[in-house]
Amino acid sequence: MKKLLLLTSALLVISASMAMAAGDRVRLSWDDCGAAGAEVTANLCTSNAPANDKFLVSSFFGPGTLPNWVGIRVIIKLSADDGSIPDWWRNDGCHTSNGWQLTFPGAIGLATCNDPWASSVNPPGGGYLWISGDGGPARATVYNDAARDTPEPINSGPEYYALVNVVKAIKTTGVGACVGCLEPVVLVLDEILLYQQVGSPGGDIISLKNSPTPATIACAKYNGGLSCEATPARNATWGGLKKLYR
């Protein structure tokens, strides 16, 4: 599923028109959307139990009237405080792909912001691609993709849920544990891409970038973390994405 979504969205970038919206329209918080969530979460790293899972919630403000929205890409950049990504965060390594999961707001009972997934006739689908070392040894990039089977209107103004990422507590303690759970990291929401049916008013692909203003950067800290400064973007090319699947 994750390969299909990534490849499909990459093809859309080539074939469809793209519109750019002003910055400062995306948010990233722990436990809920925007101001209802928290900028910082703490983890004592004493248990592998699901009760210690962390929920990273991305959201966005409607950039205009989009009548035929069907999918999304949420790009998150991670920076470690210790010069390299801790093993506990390496979801393409020690922590395995189960250490970071993608889900939807309704699945964990969130209802503060508008939920564009709730009206989907069939359950929406999604997946992610985690790339450690993207931009340096202390950085990683996560491409989260999801789609629904019927179009949904997005209106200008309200705050909408994008996606929820679950940072699982697995491999925190005991045999096979990954080191580095206590290490501070910072996560920055670099960009959200909203996909519409081709030819729709408002554009086929709408790009929502992070805020250029330090005080309003879409950022979430884990166990303290670095200052919330926008992580330098590294644009993915279609050729680069294809190499990941060879």
Image: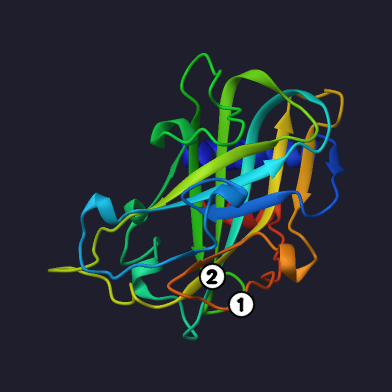
Q: Which residue matches tag 2? A: 186
Query: From the viewer's perspective, is 199 left or right of 109?
Result: right
In the orientation shown, which residue stands out farthest toward the front?
36
Q: Nearer the viewer, residue 74 or 241?
A: 74
Q: Amino acid at mark 2?
A: Val
Q: Is residue 164 above or below residue 130?
A: above
Q: At which x and y percent is residue 220?
A: 55, 63
Write the residue at 85% across / 36% down: 17
Identify the colour scheme used: rainbow
The alpha-carbon separation of the residues under discs 2 and 1 comes to 8 Å
Q: If you read the primary sequence from the N terminus, does the residue marked by circle 2 or circle 1 appear first?
A: 2
The image shows a total of numbered marks equal to 2
Query: From the viewer's perspective, is 209 left or right of 78?
Result: right
Write the residue at 52% across / 78% down: 138
Query: From the viewer's perspective, is 76 left or right of 26?
Result: left
Q: Amino acid at mark 1?
A: Ser
- Decide: few, some or many residues near mark 2? Use Cα within 10 Å; few <14, some 14-19, many ≥20: many
Write the residue at 29% across / 76% down: 179
- In this orientation, does residue 3 appear? yes
Please report contact status of discs 2 and 1: CB closer than 8 Å, yes or no: yes
Q: Nearer the viewer, residue 68 or 109?
A: 109
Q: Describe the element under mark 1 as helix, strand or loop.
A: loop
Q: At which x and y percent is residue 206?
A: 79, 40
Q: Which residue matches tag 1? A: 227
Figure quadrant of residue 12: top right
In the orientation shown, which residue stands out farthest toward the top?
121
In the orientation shown, which residue stands out farthest toward the left?
175
Q: At which x and y percent is residue 184?
A: 45, 76
Q: Is residue 123 above or below residue 245?
A: above
Q: At which x and y percent is residue 18?
A: 84, 40
- Decide: few, some or many residues near mark 1? Use Cα within 10 Å; few <14, some 14-19, many ≥20: few
Q: Is residue 115 above or below residue 224?
A: above
